[in-house]
Amino acid sequence: MLYLLIIIVVFKSQSNIDNYVLYATSGLIFWIFFANVTNQSIASIINSSGIIKALNVPTVFFPLSEMISELFNFILTLFVFAIAMHWFGIQYSFNLLTIIPITILFAVFTFGITLIFCSLNVFFRDVGILWTTIQPAIFYLTPIPYPEKVLTDRYPLVVQLNPIYYFIKLEREVIYKGVFPSGELWLQCTVLATGMLCIGYFIFSRLKNQFISSL
């Protein structure tokens, strides 16, 4: 809540966005989910080193458990958000049900990134520190607290190379605009989610046999 208040105070007067609270909050809750999952999961293998060495447990369960825990919290947040945003003009319609597959796609994408980070962090313990350092930059390079045209008009390449942007845009079509997203946007997010999961699992699978010797 404090994070949202800071954003509203700093950006609202400069944004010229109708219904700014709904706009900013709809992007912020998805970003917080992404940040929480990656931050909590990045050290999940290291923190579970005792269990991994003692028991024959699939190592993928540890980052997956962090993901499921945060996903449960996120779903509860969505319910509270949907109720609270009644006072800020959210449109209740069947289109809102598409937030379920959108959340699944974003969770799959986030889990793919998580697998990469937690794998590399076993061998390079500064990965977590590095991620924490660059995370704020990624946040401000994603049009969450400000209009997306600020970037698309001046730095279109920054937007095109930012995969998180597509998921934020997808969910805002539903939550902020109250419309069903285009097929092209669905396809882009599906490809990004599937591709990131495949890359993440591939890297994780190649490195997991070396985890015990590095823990």
Image (tube, rainbow, N blue to C red):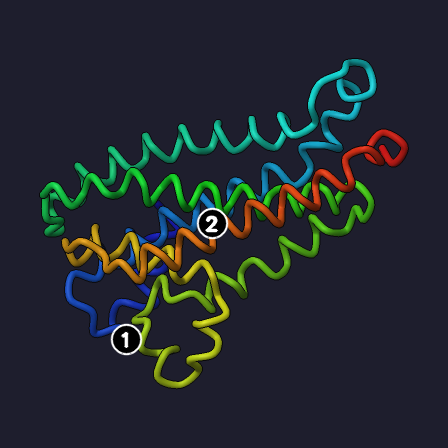
Query: Is residue 2 left or right of 174 when viewed as pictured?
Result: right
Q: Residues within 10 Å of mark 1 (few under 14, many from 20)?
A: few
Give the quadrant of the C terminus. Answer: top right
Q: Is residue 115 above or below residue 163?
A: above
Q: Which residue type carries mark 2?
A: Ala
Q: Which residue type carries mark 1?
A: Gln
Q: Residues within 10 Å of mark 2 (few under 14, many from 20)?
A: many
The picture quadrant where one finds residue 146 is bottom left
Q: Which residue is mark 2?
A: 193
Q: Nearer the viewer, residue 214 or 20?
A: 214
Q: In the image, which disc is placed on residue 204? A: none
Q: Nearer the viewer, residue 200 or 68?
A: 200
Q: Is residue 111 above or below residue 182?
A: above
Give the residue displayed 37% in from the left and 66% down from the top.
143
Give the residue displayed 65% in from the left and 41% down from the top.
42
Q: Is residue 151 above or below residue 83?
A: below
